[in-house]
Amino acid sequence: MKNKILKELIKIVDKKNVSADKIDLLHYAYDATQNMYLPDFVVFPENTEQISHILKLCTEYKVPIVPRGAGTGFSGGSLPISGGICLSLEKMNKILEIDTENLVAHVEAGVINYDLREETEKFGLLYPPDPSSYKYCTIGGNVAENAGGPRAVKYGVTKNYILGMELVFPTGEIVISGSKNMKDVAGYNLKDLMIGSEGTLAIITKLFLKLIPLPPYRSVLQATFSDMKEAAQTVSNIIADKVTPSALEFIDGPCIRAIEDYLHIGLPKEAQAMLIIECDGMKESVEAELSLIEKVCAKNNAQHVKRAKDKKEEEVLWKARRSISPSLNRIRDGKLNEDVVVPRASLPQMIASIQEISKKYNLPIVNFGHAGDGNIHTNIMFNKGSDEEKRAKDVMKEIFETVIEMGGSISGEHGIGITKQDFLEKQLGKETIDIFKRIKKALDPYNILNPHKMKLC
Ligand SMILES: Cc1cc2nc3c(=O)[nH]c(=O)nc-3n(C[C@H](O)[C@H](O)[C@H](O)COP(=O)(O)OP(=O)(O)OC[C@H]3O[C@@H](n4cnc5c(N)ncnc54)[C@H](O)[C@@H]3O)c2cc1C
């Protein structure tokens, strides 16, 4: 059977665009969770019609198929749990149009977020969603996960910029939902159902994206604190003071030390928390907002508050923020990386609860993230293969329970995939999961598209 499918795939995409070679398969067996599942084939379609034919083939032979952007996902969404086809969108990476009259970009789903940003900036425009993985991740992956990023606090997340999309459904139909129009309410809003659907309902092939004018000026400051709760309180106060920074990021003490040991950029290792706060807009309003923020930091006993003097200093601060993931393995060789979110005013309470849980289980928990959205990445650190590994899972469960009790969510941006599927029903309830299952069954009757994710079957 495998040989027959391979022959059919070659007919559809040509020999150069399909592989069943073990080395190639290994490259596509991972995502950022570091779990591994080998696909049987990896296929690199070059256009929508090829994807439609591949899906018809999968439906005919009941072969599982898993869409993949860049594999930077943190919840296992692009892992081929039951083998089958890994459908890599990496060759569908064309920016088809930057429409400077309508402020719309038309792109293929495999475009890298960074490449789109670079291109739009040439026209004085901005595509705001900026996951910290933006140099590698694809727009299709961002839409499938509804990715956020540091600038979501002011500009919102991926869903706020999706005007339209081209989709291929598991039975092969090609459908366009939405358009270049800023407003469009004709019929069911299929495109919004696809945002955050984690590749379980359709393959996204092309997108119309809303662009905004590039803010003319921005400036960044760094504030450090000797007490994590004071940093969390500063975040709440900034929001309550009705200032909207373009980024409001939080990094805790163990994280600061891990970054400094990794990058050696002069971060204060004695600090227990650090905020990176960016404002953008007209120069005068940015300066006024930052002055106000400096006062809030001082009121909450910040140790040092420093504005970046130039682009180089700004870049160092952002580099520190983006280097957190690789620097953490200095603490332990294993981590469970969760991205819980609570209503923004509850952030100090959430940080305090996580600290208590860390003490109770005697395990280090490192926190950082998009504090301005109440979205914190809690990294439960453990040594692989030791008894810490089991305790880490108990810690995760207790953190999820705490977050749900506080009216929060088990995922602010990384999605459910395989890593959080056991907790989804606890948050949403059985009735909601049953509706999800009915939608899945209607659109993917043979359960070929990204099966075994989100406990949908
Ligand atoms: C260092 C690091 C920092 C990160 N920072 C952030 C952050 O700040 N904010 C954030 O939100 N996330 C962040 N992430 C997580 C990750 O980068 C995002 O979830 C991103 O959107 C995944 O994009 P991708 O192209 O790598 O998708 P993949 O990981 O390949 O796939 C993710 C999911 O999307 C589906 N999918 C991919 N392409 C398509 C398509 N064309 N059609 C249908 N389904 C598709 C896959 O099946 C899978 O379920 C980070 C990850 C890393 C490693």
Image (cartoon, helix red, strand yellow):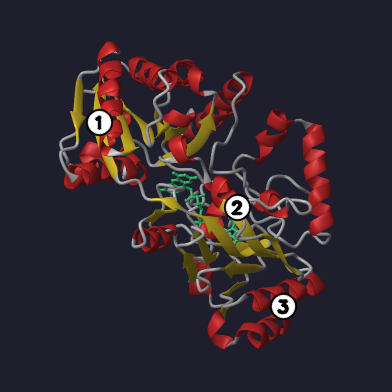
Check the image and report above or below for 108 versus 16: above
> Residue at coordinates 51% horizontally, 59% vertically from top-left?
102
Foreground mark, 3 or 1, reads: 1
Q: Are marks 3 and 1 in contact (CB under 8 Å)?
A: no
The amino acid type, in three-letter code, at marker 1 is: Glu
Q: Earlier in the sequence, mark 2 or mark 3?
A: 3
Return the x and y of residue 165 as percentages of the image width and height: 63, 61
Residue at the far front: name it: 101
Mark nearer the viewer, 2 or 3: 2
Query: Residue 130 at what x, y percent from top left?
Result: 43, 48
* First-in-chain label (3 vs 1): 3
Residue drawn at point x = 70 percent, y = 49 percent: 193
Q: Can residue 77 be seen from the camera position used here?
A: no
What is the three-letter code of the residue carrying label 3?
His
Spatial CA distance of label 1 from label 2 is 32 Å
Residue 182 is tagged as 2
Up/down of 218 relative to 212, above or below: above
Q: Residues within 10 Å of mark 1 (few under 14, many from 20)?
A: some
Is disc 1 in contact with disc 2, using a CB cutoff of under 8 Å?
no
Q: Secondary structure at mark 3?
A: helix
Residue corresponding to mark 3: 53
- Label 1: state its secondary structure: helix
Task: Name which residue lies at 78% across and 36% down.
Answer: 432
Quadrant containing the N terminus is bottom right
Q: Nearer the viewer, residue 309 or 216?
A: 216
Name the secondary structure under disc 2: loop
Which residue, given by chain and number where applicable, does mark 1 sit on? 287
301 relative to 272, above or below: above
Three-letter code for the amino acid on which mark 2 is drawn = Met
CA–CA distance in space, label 2 to label 3: 32 Å
